[in-house]
Amino acid sequence: MVLIREFELKAKEVFRSGRMPGFIHVYIGEEAVATGVCGQLRKDDYVASTHRGHGHALAKGISARDAMAELMGVVTGCSGGRGGTMHLYDPTVGFLGSNGVVPPGILIATGAGLSAKLKGGDQVAVAFFGDGGSNNGAFHEGLNMAATWDIPVIFVCENNMYATEMPFAKATKNTNIASRAAAYGIPGVQVDGNNVLEVYEKTGEAVARARRGEGPTLIECLTYRWFGHHEGDPGVAYRTKEEIAAWKARDPIQKLHDDAIAAKLASEQEFKQIDVDIKGELEDAAEFALSSPLEKNETALDHVYFNPAAD
Ligand SMILES: Cc1ncc(C[n+]2csc(CCOP(=O)(O)OP(=O)(O)O)c2C)c(N)n1
Ligand SMILES: [Mg+2]
């Protein structure tokens, strides 16, 4: 969670300095979801992600260097600098991509889960998507197919109560997304998305069920993004200061810290060391990304067409 938090703070800083192309959506405030879910996954399990995908990518195993370089559009990025923030991708760690379109991860993960099932493996696939994404047709198509064919997918909805500036309660009548699972005949569970241990526990049950061949689960994680929809949106025109402050007081990192200290499972010193180590890792990642070269112009058409003669 600290890695994701510090990555996003560094990405914001670099973006605001004008050196990062495009625009980014940061995940700060929602770190417990990616961390709790991916903590239950093996390297060969799959994750399909969203436009707010940095946290998912890091939690699934893409390094801070490879992700930061991709955000900068430089050759050392995980997609060779050709994709950027919304095309982070690394099949070697099972990360099937962040996405600019909302919410194809549902269908990509369903396809990945189907491939694992057809090949007879026990891998599972996770689809992350937002409350806004849950009102897209892909939600129905993906959940219906996965339920019907017992595909090993875990559908993880990050309900942060807004899709850009649209409050979820204004966009849908039934705001309990987990309850929609009943319509597909699969389990649906609502969890505190700011409690990493609860996310971890409920995901564990869903993963075990999927690996047993019993099909998908829908997990709705209640959470909140601290900042605007994207860098540049102050995020305050459609949300009250009180609401933002109330959710910041429920910081998932602080919660785990407080719970672990109270249970004597970790010391202040250990937490401080995590902060120091991760800050160092992010300084290194930013330095690496900022000093890497852009791809040469003459390679612009590489990877557009498959050339069997060249392989
Ligand atoms: C098919 C499609 N429609 C609209 C958009 C523009 N858009 C990008 S993000 C977003 C809101 C997504 O909200 P949600 O799914 O709740 O995710 P969050 O941003 O809250 O994490 C929209 C409408 C898009 N990228 N793709
Ligand atoms: Mg949302």
Image (spheres, grey):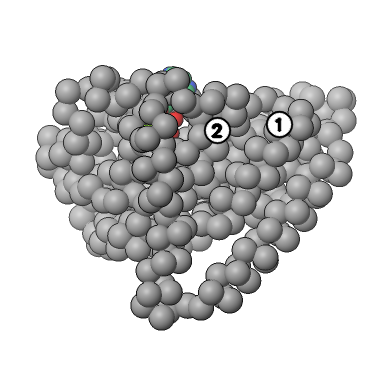
- Secondary structure, mark 2, is loop
Residue 150 shows in the view: no
Pinpoint residue 234: horizontal percent, then vertical percent.
54, 26
For residue 16, the mark is: 1
Pinpoint residue 23: horizontal percent, then vertical percent.
63, 27
- Secondary structure, mark 1, is helix
Dot 1 amino acid type: Arg
Circle 1 Cα neighbour tier, 10 Å, few/some/many (<14 / 14–19 / ≥20): few
Disc 2 and disc 1 in contact, CB within 8 angstroms:
no
> In which quadrant of the rendered image does the C terminus lie?
top right
Indicate which label's residue lies in the foreground, 2 or 1: 1
Marks 2 and 1, the one that precedes in the sequence: 1
Determine which residue is flagged by label 2: 25
- Is the CB of the residue bearing disc 2 within 8 angstroms of ligand 1? yes
Pinpoint residue 121: horizontal percent, then vertical percent.
38, 59
Which residue occupies 67% across, 66% down? 277
Which residue occupies 73% across, 43% down? 69
Could you tell whether 35 is left or right of 65 in the image?
left
Could you tell whether 246 is left or right of 54 in the image?
left
Residue 186 shows in the view: yes
Q: Quadrant of residue 208?
A: bottom left
